[in-house]
Amino acid sequence: MYYPIKIPRWLQSFFPNYIWRGKTEANSKRLYLTFDDGPIPEITPWVLEQLRAYDAKATFFCVGENVQKNQAIYQQIIAEGHQVGNHTFKHLNGWSTTKADYLDNVAACGEQVDSLLFRPPYGRLKWGQAKALRANYKMVLWEILAGDFDASISGEQCWQNVCKNATDGSIVVLHDSQKSWKHLSYVLPKLLEYYHNKGFTFEVISTK
Ligand SMILES: [Zn+2]
């Protein structure tokens, strides 16, 4: 499986309609953690607990059907000051979905997730889908893919993917999913401790 760990700035700049990095200022130290595909009872409350210990805020790109099933956890995410974003109702792959079906699915998620942020599952969208969604959403991609979903790498490699690459302003993708649990449970505590000790804060992606 190939995927780029870090999206280079020059490539980001080719797609200015997407958000790749969070806001920064001179000498700021900020990371923008994002958790995709939840919320689920097995993982998301644990993630919230880890974040709470560092007063860290994050952005959760929620799958609509998970929010429907796990309302209390969704409400907890919001109550604890995190940001949420739309990640479609059924985690659709835009490349294999018609525009009409895709937009319907985003709208169905929108009934569960009240947010102006959207992240396409797998980062995959067709041009027409993207154009239509831009009218209503801020489109959020990422700079760093930890690879927590990748069973072919070790937890340590996953951690190295983050700590060798994430710098001020980086949006980092992690997953509150069963598939990613093995690596997430190793990486998230390390990540929070390491960057906290370096003076970083963890912030939500702004909807403005
Ligand atoms: Zn996803």
Image (cartoon, rainbow, N blue to C red):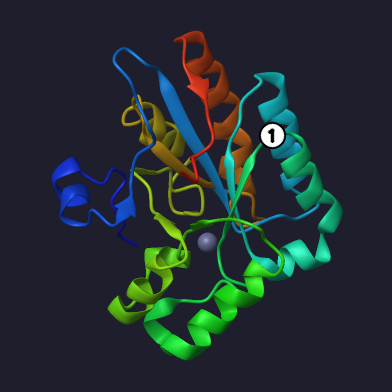
Q: Say whether residue 170 is left or right of residue 189.
A: left
Pick whichever, 63 or 85, lies toward us: 85
Q: Is residue 125 visible?
A: no
Pick whichever, 125 or 116, lies toward us: 116
CB of residue at label 1: within 8 Å of ligand 1? Answer: no
* Residue name at image x 86 percent, y 52 percent: 72
Q: Say whether residue 133 is left or right of residue 174.
A: left
Label 1: how many Cα within 10 Å (few below 14, some 14–19, many 20+): some
Q: Position of residue 129 (x, y in %)?
A: 38, 78
Q: Secondary structure at mark 1?
A: loop
Q: Is residue 56 visible?
A: yes
Q: Position of residue 46 (x, y in %)?
A: 75, 38
On screen, residue 129 above or below 141: below
**Dividing the picture into quarters, in which one does residue 45 lie?**
top right
Count every numbered label the image shows and give the total: 1
Pick whichever, 7 or 32, lies toward us: 32
Residue occupied by mark 1: 81
Q: Say whether residue 56 is left or right of residue 145.
A: right
* Residue name at image x 67 percent, y 68 percent: 64
The residue type indicated by label 1 comes to: Gly
* Residue name at image x 47 percent, y 41 percent: 154
On screen, residue 159 above or below 113: above
Q: Position of residue 36 (x, y in %)?
A: 56, 53
**Dividing the picture into quarters, in which one does residue 48 lie?**
top right
Quadrant of the rendering where the N terminus is positioned: bottom left
On screen, residue 208 above or below 38: above
Pick whichever, 77 or 197, lies toward us: 77
